[in-house]
Structures are given as structure tokens and as C-alpha cells.
Amino acid sequence: GIQLADRVKLLETESAFEVLEKANRLQAQGMEVVHLEIGEPDFSTDSSVLQAAARALEEGHTKYGPPVGLPALRQAIAGHAGARRGIEVLSEQVVVTPGAKPILFFAMQACVNPGDEVILPDPGFPIYQSVIRYCGAVPKHVPIIEKDDNFTMDLDALEAAITPRTRAIILNSPHNPTGGIIPQEDMAAIVSLLQDKNILVISDEIYSDIYYDEPPITIASFPGMREKTIIIDGFSKSYAMTGWRLGYGIMPKMLVEQFSKLAVNVHSCTPPFVQLAGVEALKEGQASLERMVKEFKERRDILVEGLRNINGFRCPTPKGAFYAFPNIEGTGFDSKTLANKLLEEGGVAALNGSSFGEAGNGYLRFSYANSQENITKALEKIDAVLSSKK
Ligand code: PLP
């Protein structure tokens, strides 16, 4: 039979996809299920973007393009992403990929050797650990902790995690799964820990447009940090374009050549008609983005207040992204048991916090990328499951 390579056994997957499958199975058996497990906006892509893609297809933008992206899109991203963050971004620093994930994968491939240590948030996006291990590198978890009605990086743990073997650190703010945003003073403290060290920063800013109060700040805006930071961002969340596969990285120019080689070896290029739709999204998609964030904020308030009213739940206020991350230890259940119970008995699909890392134990992740009506229904179902417990 076929023998698998050792390295592929190191890859992990995202539990959201597994829970979705189980939820869909229960649904097919006739159960009413509210989906709060999925990390994708439930909005449709703006019609101007659909039309731009259709136009691009008709005009024949269906061939190979430059491996790192069309000049028109790289230019548009540089202007947009730079202005939003208050930093200068040149179009030659932008690499366009099919979704944001390849930027993470290529960053690790380009910059991390086997045996190197890479710091990552715990809880955190499961793909970080998967890709680190796939590269033969060693994941070093730094807890994301509750602080001032927010979640942020544990700075003492970060200081302790940095060693001479640390090659890179992954930051993610706004944060999946907690909805936390690293505040200015904590970011400044992170910068001072990294300043004089030769450590690459991979700053996953895929939720940068989705915040409810103070905008997130990028580490790349601090003096001396731009030269060692790769920013990850994309169109999936901001413009409700998860299935289009369109993302990008902003990086020091010397890395672009390496990313270009990786692109040629893996996917050749990002589909040109998708990229032209992206140009349109940056131009015409802002009103849709604002409407979406306004709606997310209303849903957040309903969900968070409802969760706080459930016995045994404690829920900090999410500052960005579209996830609430309540601590549920007061219910007497562990988070895995409760996630299963809510799905099987209540028809509410949520994710067990520990599927994002050990420090997520005791928490559940609820996505509020679902209607206010469904969120209200889910809250009633959760309450019913917990008040019927013996
Ligand atoms: N980074 C984080 C933190 C995410 O939550 C996601 C999507 O769930 C991604 C990256 C991947 O984005 P994309 O679908 O554009 O590859």
C-alpha cells in the first residue's frame, strides 16, 4: 500500500470543520441546529464585487498571472492597507495569495528551520501549531489571558518563552477565538521584548477591519518593527469572500522573491478574475463592510448579555472579530463535555475552547456570524439544556 511521509502526519486540522460535519449530520436526522461554530461572515459578497468578477471573466482574465499578484491589486492593497494602519506600504512589499493561509505557510517555509522555536498564542487559530510542527519547528505557547474585560497576551509568559532559539512569533489581534484586541500598552511591551532581537513577527491581522471600539494597532507601526514583520490580511472576513480565496501578505521586500518562488512551486498565481474582484472590493466594498460591522456589534451585544445571564458563564466583551469566548467552568462541566451536550441535547453548535489550545480549556467559542433571531434562539436552547441538568 501507500506509505505516508512522516511530515504529513504532523499536520492537524480545524475542529470547526469537524463540528460542522457533526452538526449537519444531526440536522439531517431532523434536529433543529443553530450554527455558532463557523468562522465566516453570513453576509453575501457585495454585488459590485460579483459584477467585477463577471466582467473580468468576460474580458478574458482567465490565464496565468504574475506569481505574487496583479500590479493593480498590489497597488490597491498597498494604498488601502497602509492608510488603514497609518504606515507606509509599497506595492512591491505586497504578495497576493489564494486566501490568507498561504502567507502563514510560506512565511514558515521561508524563514523557519527545523528545531527553531516559534511562539504562538494559546488559545489560537489551530493552523498555527499545525504549520509550525509541519516545518519541524517547536511550538512555544504563550497564554492569551483575561484582563480588563478583554483578552490579551500574558506578557510575563511571553518574556519567559523567548530564548536564543526563538526564530519567530505569531501575533493575532483581533484574536480568534477570544475576540480580544491587544491594547496599545501591551503591544508596546511586546515590542520592547522583541526590539533588540532577531525574531520574525508574523502578525495575523485578518480581522483588522472588524472591531467595535478602538481600532487594533499593528506591531508594524512601532519603530524598527516593519523591517522584521510579515502582516497577514485578506478579503475573506472583511468583504465576506471566504470562498473566493483571496488574501495577502505585507513584508520586507527581500522576502518577496522567496514568496514568489514558493508561489510558483505551489499554485503559480491567484486567479486574475478573483484579484480584479478584490480591486473592486477595496474600491466599492467599504459601505458593505461598515454595515456588516454594525450588525456584528448588535449581535455581539445580544449574545454577550445572554451568555452572562446563564448560570455558570462569565463572558468578557469581545473587542473585535465575531467570536465570544465565555468561561463556563461555573457550570460544573468541562468545556468538551458542555460543547457536546449543547449540540446533542440543545442543537447549539459551538466550539470547545481547548480545541484552540490547552489554555482554552474551560471556555467555549461562539461565532456570532448568524442572525439575531438565531442567536436569541440559541441562548434559549443553552438555558434550557443547563436548567434541565440534574
Ligand atoms: N487567520 C485566522 C486567525 C483565521 O481565523 C482565519 C480564518 O478562519 C484565517 C487566518 C484564514 O483566512 P483565509 O480563509 O483567508 O485563508
Image (cartoon, rainbow, N blue to C red):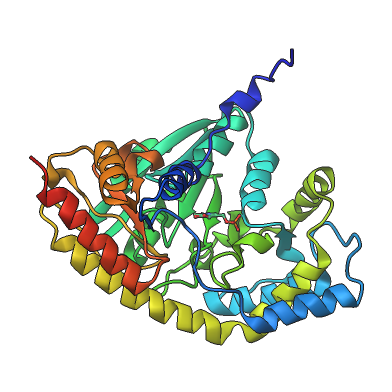
Q: Residue at x 27, y 65 (%)?
A: 377
**318 above or below 290?**
above
Q: Name which quarter of the figure residue 295 lies in.
A: bottom left
Locate residue 252, reporting x and y percent: 68, 58
* Residue 63 falls left or right of residue 89: right
The one nearer the camera, 384 or 245, is: 384
Residue at x 16% of width, y 43% of height: 329
- Above or below, 115 relative to 168: above
Q: In which quarter of the image is residue 113?
A: top right
Q: Which quadrant would the N terminus be assigned to in this image?
A: top right
Q: How many marks?
A: 0
What residue occupies the far left of the structure in this picture? Answer: 390
Give coordinates of residue 232: x percent, y percent.
Answer: 59, 58
Q: Can residue 5 be seen in this view?
A: yes
Percent coordinates x, y for residue 214 in the rendering: 36, 76
Q: Note whether 101 is above or below 131 in the view shown.
A: below
Q: Write down which quadrant ligand 1 falls in.
A: bottom right
Identify the image quadrant of the C terminus. Answer: top left
The one nearer the camera, 171 or 312, is 312
Q: Is residue 88 left or right of 203 when viewed as pictured?
A: right
The answer to whether residue 212 is visible is no
Frontmost residue, 278 versus 334? 334
Residue at 35% of width from left, 51% of height from top? 350
| Identity of the residue furthest to the top in this view | 1
- Between 26 and 255, the one nearer to me in the picture: 26
- Quarter assignment of residue 184: bottom left
Relative to 98, say whether 60 is above or below.
Answer: below
Residue visible at 71% across and 64% down in the picture: 94
